[in-house]
Amino acid sequence: MHADSPDAPDDTLRRVIAELRRPVHLDARIDDRVLRAIAREQALPPRRVRPARWAGGALGGALAAGLLLTLLGRDAAPTRPIELRLIAPASHVMVVGDFNDWDPAATPLRRGNEGGTWTVELRLPPGRYRYTFLVDGRRWVPDPEEPRAADDDFGAPMSVLTVS
Amino acid sequence: MPRCAVPLAVVAVLATATLHAQERRLVDRLDPVTATAVQQLIDSARTAELPTEPLVQKALEGATLGAGGDRIRTAVGVLLGQLGRARDVLGPTATEAELTAGAGALRAGLTSETLQRLQVMRPGQPLVVPLSVLTDLVAEGMTADLAARSVFDLARNGRPDADFLALRRRVQTELRSTAPREDGPPGRSPGRPAANPPATRP
Amino acid sequence: MPLRVLSQSAVTGGLSPVSEADAVLVGRTLAGDLAAFASLMSRYRESLGRYAYHMLGSREDAEEAVQDSFVRAYRSLGDCRQPERFAAWLFTILVNRCRTSQRRLFRRRRFSEDLRDDVAAGGDAAASLEWREEIARALAALRPHYREAFLLRYVEGLDYAEMARLTGAREPTLRMRVKRAGDQLRELLRDIHAR
């Protein structure tokens, strides 16, 4: 905008404009609230009408198909029965690990007839899984029957299970 | 809707839904800032054609253990780097399970050369169990050299996975019976009070 | 950083079309990458916030308008036919959202509370605050269409062609609004300026 253009502001307006151009800091939590709103709606934006602008319609569809098949294939791998066991005085015992999204409510162990013995049977595809037991909702207890995990990222004792 | 996308529309939607389910776990369990940061790492992994599920699980592990966002982001970032290194060593045909096991082995201090030698000794065979046993032996206190030699012996002779697991059990029993345990006698698990009490789900 | 394009364009004119990074982020968002959308929000939150704040008169209303605009943008991202001009498209959503707010009761500005947060450290803080309060009062006194045109032209630096696309008004009408807004502001602030 040049000084000699028809609507070039005069000095007063220049001062006003300079003031109005100062940054206005809004709460950065706006972003959080937007993401939460999006997640709650569980909706993705509709696909572009012209996929050729991106990956090409057929190619994009093929990629999506391949990805889906890969995802399905991973979940369809043969599984092995695995029993986890813990001997501990407790009211309730859960297991959390790579096989149940570390959900402390997902996989309870069952108390056996022998006092203090807790077991659960899982079916897992071949792989390596980190896990630990949660005893009475407040103690992290590693599995004495399996190796301890060498890497401890979060300060709780971990075991590692290898399924062949 | 373009003609070519019509037959694949269902597949595209399902694939998108699966991807979306993955993001939902992060959104549900992590604060938005951490979820976004982790999602960016996952996106980087996807771009690099590295497995993303181990990264999601690492983030969820941190969430359950009550770790702070910074710690979670760091752990996921470190794992991403380890997966990349594992892929550099094991090659593009390594499975997700092999890359995860390889990343663990590298982190435990085993060298790239050790992993490559193991791969050469077991051509065309899954490496998850040998890599895992290598890592576990070192975690139990065996030196990396001795662990490698023990595993190489089995690999060189074409032994099955069960033999590797048996080796690990023997070593574990032997080492635990001779070394003082900080957490009590074998078979008993007094456990550790949760320094980080389990994070409740929102 | 494309965020600054909107203010720098006050000199060069217009919302810059050079936003390749925006196009990439839009594409990733459409593919399901929420982090990409978070990057877009981080990039444009402040520039959107500035317009909404001056248009609506309160930080709270501005935050609500910006938040609603982002959600709307996400929902309708598939309709963004020129992702390289995402910024302009997003701004259109915000302008319309602010117009909707205007049609409701225009809330009394809590400008004293809001402005005190923003007074620059150092310098003559009291005088700065008074000047900013007077500007805010003068701006609030303008008709909404005049205020909108003034902000888009002089604060956001759009040219009249872009303003016409964004508002739906004809260019001559927009020129008239900008001129009248300037005249009225000058009149309202004359006494202040003369002090």
Image (cartoon, coloured by chain):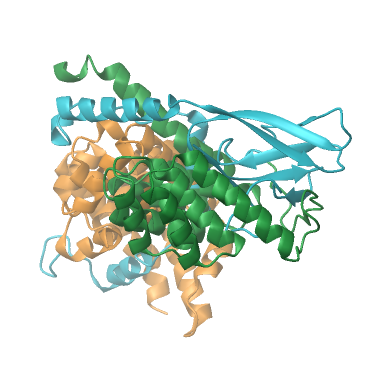
Chain colours: A cyan, B green, C orange
> Which residue is at the front of the view, A2 or A22?
A22
Q: Residue at 75%, 66% (x, y): give it.
A: B180
Residue A53 is left or right of residue C149, and the answer is left
Q: Residue at 59%, 52% (x, y): give it.
A: B62
Residue B69 image point, x, y percent: 56, 57
> Which residue is at the front of the view, C35 or B10?
B10
Q: Residue at 15%, 16% (x, y): give it.
A: B3
> Which residue is at the front of the view, B161 or B91?
B161
Any part of residue C104 in sight:
no
Residue A129 image point, x, y percent: 54, 43
Q: Quadrant of the C terminus of chain C?
A: bottom left
User: What is the residue that sits farthest to the front in this orientation?
Assistant: B157
User: What is the residue that sits farthest to the bottom in this orientation?
Assistant: C123
Q: Residue at 66%, 28% (x, y): give it.
A: A121
Residue A75 image point, x, y percent: 44, 27
Any part of residue B7 in sight:
yes
> Which residue is at the front of the view, C113 or A81?
A81
Give the number of callouts: 0
Above or below, B145 against A158 in this view is: below
User: What is the residue that sits farthest to the top in this orientation?
Assistant: B7
Q: Quadrant of the N terminus of chain C?
A: bottom left
Residue B179 is left or right of residue C191, and the answer is right
Residue C146 is left or right of residue A136, and the answer is left
Residue C186 image point, x, y percent: 32, 64
Above or below, C36 against A52 in this view is: below
Quarter of the image holding residue B89? Answer: bottom left
